Amino acid sequence: MPEEHDLYPQARACLSVCDVDTKLSLTRATAERWRQGDFILAESGVVAVDEPGRPDKPELVERQGLAKRGMQNIKARAALIHALCHIEFNAINLAWDAVYRFRELPSRYYADWIQVADEEAYHFTLLRDYLKTLGYDYGDFTAHGGLWKMALETAHDPLVRMALVPRVLEARGLDVTPGIMARFRKAGYQEVVDILEIIQRDEVGHVEIGSRWFVYLCEQRGLNSEVKFCELLEEYMKAYKKGPIDRDARRRAGFSEQELDYLDGTG
């Protein structure tokens, strides 16, 4: 089978390309080819990807170097939208990394994460298009550089990746997005609310995919998934702050009541 029909090199290409528009178009095309049955899961080696493809801008900084975000003026609102764009851009790379890095899993696993990459690209496009109406584009503000760190820390094991990236980092969006939507709704920016409603709906599904494969991998190894999740959080994210969460959204995303109690500090 020629390499162009091997999914893994194509996933690596999607992950590694730096130009934003090329990454988006290649992601959409690859997802469509997968849906059409144009790829196989060939036996090919994994070449470590320490840094994903990204453009020269935005400049990556620590949190204290980020632009002020809020509703007080157009620039602050644009900075907030830009931050959301950056999250979605990183989510594209994280999804492709989940496809490329982890092998010998069921075909459904790859289908799920290709779908996630495709939907994250759509989310990014929605937010970027709105950002352009404000006179800005992705890369015009600084961005936080720590989002890829957890990908590297979980690169050795898909079980750990599923526990900590979709179920912790991405799931945090389920808790905070309703509040962001409320701020935009109160300020009269319904177009942004409509975009965030789409993102929130899809992100529940993305986190559920992470939950489902985490449980699957735990079952394959004879592990209690609820216990293992808490253990991994304690091991890798000691600074994780327990507190209020959107329990309903997280239930729909595959969290158990025991896990929810642990996360909000009541268990």
Image (cartoon, rainbow, N blue to C red):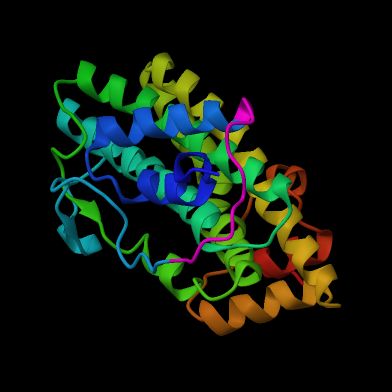
Residue, x 57% and y 63% (percent of image)?
A: 102
Name the quadrant of the N terminus.
Answer: top right
Q: Is residue 191 above or below residue 248?
A: above
Residue sitting at x 58%, y 36%: 115
Magenta stretch: give its range.
35-46
Q: Which residue lies at the image location 16% right of the left edge and 49% below the top edge?
A: 142
Q: Is residue 112 above or below residue 16?
A: above
Q: Is residue 260 left or right of residue 65?
A: right
Residue 71 at x, y percent in the picture? 27, 31
- Magenta span: predominant SS is loop
Q: Residue furthest bottom?
A: 235
**Residue closer to the observer: 105 or 163:** 105
Viewer-nearest residue: 14 or 243: 14
Is any atom of residue 161 visible in this view? yes
- Is 184 on the left or on the right of 20, as rendered? right
Residue 223 point in image, percent of width and height = 82, 77
Does residue 66 appear to the left or right of 70 in the view shown?
left
Foreground of the two, 78 or 244: 78
